[in-house]
Image (spheres, helix red, strand yellow):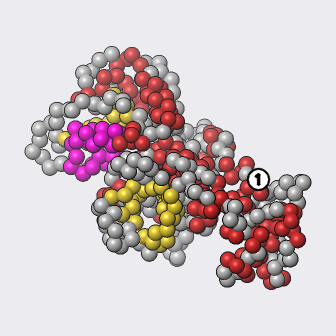
Amino acid sequence: MPRLPEPLPEPVSNAPFPPVEQNSGQRAGESMSEFFDRRKGENTRWEAMETVVRRRAREQQEENAARGQVPGRGGARVFEWVKSSGHFIRTAGGRPRYEELWEEYGPSQRRYDSFHNEWDLCEAFGPVDDQDSDDGDEGYNDFAPSTSTRHDEFTPSMRGVEFDRVALSFRTIVQYRYGCVVKEENRQIPPPALEYRVQPELAKRLLGDLNLQVHPNRPEELEIFCAFLGYCKAARQLEDIPRPLLDFHDLESDLYYDWVAEVRRETLGGKLYYVVYEIKSDASRPSLYVLLQSATTALEIVRQGWGPTLDEIIEKLLGRNISFSVCSRHQQIRVGPPPRRQMYSGLGFRSQRYAPDAHDYQSYVAIREQFLRSPRGRCAKSYGGIVGRLACTLISDAEVLRGPTDEVTVDGLCMWDGHSEYAYWDDYLTDQEIDLICGVYHISTGKKQASIFCVPRKLITS
């Protein structure tokens, strides 16, 4: 495991402990040495859970960090330990300042944590030494607003992002996600009653892609799927759907064989969830859990045979931009909503006739990236929908695989069934933070609150 800083001499101070910075990872009243002791224990637990692929990726990050270069866009986060009232407080370096911080702190005053992909800088780590040894390093890209910057300069990587969904065939989608059996002989099944029939355009719309192409040699597949949807509309019970059309009726279906992962239903906080977790022989190993609110997604995991590790399941869900939660389980239980966080109003308020310009866009991108790179920004990638797509270029899969942040039991979302000893915990985004990610600003009209962002919220995270 990579070396973390040795125990540090704490400054002696009788002054009250100052507030810690939100999303810095440091807990209230936690000294620097206590912070690193806690991180060391967490990293040891994560190392025990690592797959070979994850370990190789992390070791590659360590090799890159060993070069001592200033982190560029898409690189590690940087935190500076600043003394306040005699105590060290962990503060975000701010990406535009990374180059300046690298000049201020020498190599012996920088520590890299590959598990969190974060740098810590502090004068107490070591003496000021050969600070100019890293001069001339490349890798820093300033994204501060510039009058000469075009919008597309901020989002070139988004064009290269492709989710598995766009490459899936029509047959794969309807068979593995919906359980529709599109064998040619099913074309002989009589269509449903006229009032329940579904037109091809609507069927494609339900699949989320009006341009989805059916295999030219199998045109009957769309016809069969339309009949399947019609019977689903009319059905009051499973038996109302013709047996050849639905894999639930087929004893040879993957649904009736051993599953590669455990899936169970739980009612948490009055909502139905599908909890997915690994089948482990070593119960002593720490566990994470995937929570889904979509039965369709839970069944697709089984039909596709995703697994057996939770990492593999999570990577598939991320590749499809499907909404889910990665939770840890704790004995701490909180009844009621999470503590109220600092409230944002998206990007703020504007006058009725305000026209956004390039500077607004540049500012939005900078603010969005700053939030997504904070420790809590991790959960945005697993939100799916528009939020997941905006987060995918900045947040690595490895950050999602690590699970909730250290402060999850302090200000995270608690999901409890009302009687068990344990509850599931995950980080979450407030509506205001979702507005910030999506670039919403509010217009003061003196009437009902409105914004220029008109996409239904259901599409934002689904």
Q: Work out whether residue 339 or residue 235 is closer to the camera in this orientation and state it.
A: 235
Query: What amino acid is found at the position of numbered circle 1 in the picture?
Result: Ser
Q: Quadrant of residue 128?
A: top left
x, y (%) of residue 72?
50, 32
x, y (%) of residue 385?
60, 58
Q: Residue at x 11, y 38 (%)?
A: 12
Left/right placement of residue 221 relative to residue 129 reads right
Q: Residue at x 35, y 48 (%)?
A: 284
Left/right placement of residue 163 relative to residue 265 reads right
Q: How many marks?
A: 1
**410 to 93, vertically: above or below:** below
The answer to whether residue 453 is visible is no
Kindly give the residue lying farthest to the left in the view shown: 14
Q: Work out whether residue 72 or residue 384 is closer to the camera in this orientation and state it.
A: 384
Q: Residue at x 48, y 48 (%)?
A: 400
Q: Work out whether residue 311 or residue 213 is closer to the camera in this orientation and state it.
A: 311
x, y (%) of residue 403?
43, 50
Q: Badge 1 is on which residue?
A: 169
Residue 33 magenta-drawn?
A: yes
Q: Quadrant of residue 86?
A: top left
**95 to 131, vertically: above or below:** below
**260 to 153, vertically: above or below:** below
The answer to whether residue 410 is visible is yes
Q: Work out whether residue 249 or residue 165 is closer to the camera in this orientation and state it.
A: 249
Kindly give the residue lying farthest to the right in the view shown: 217
User: What element does badge 1 sit on?
Assistant: loop
Q: Which residues are magenta?
A: 20-44
The C terminus, quarter of image: bottom right
Residue 305 magenta-drawn?
A: no
Q: Answer few, some or many: residues within 10 Å of disc 1's Cα (few below 14, many 20 plus, some between 14 and 19).
A: some
x, y (%) of residue 247?
70, 66
Q: Residue at x 53, y 66 (%)?
A: 293
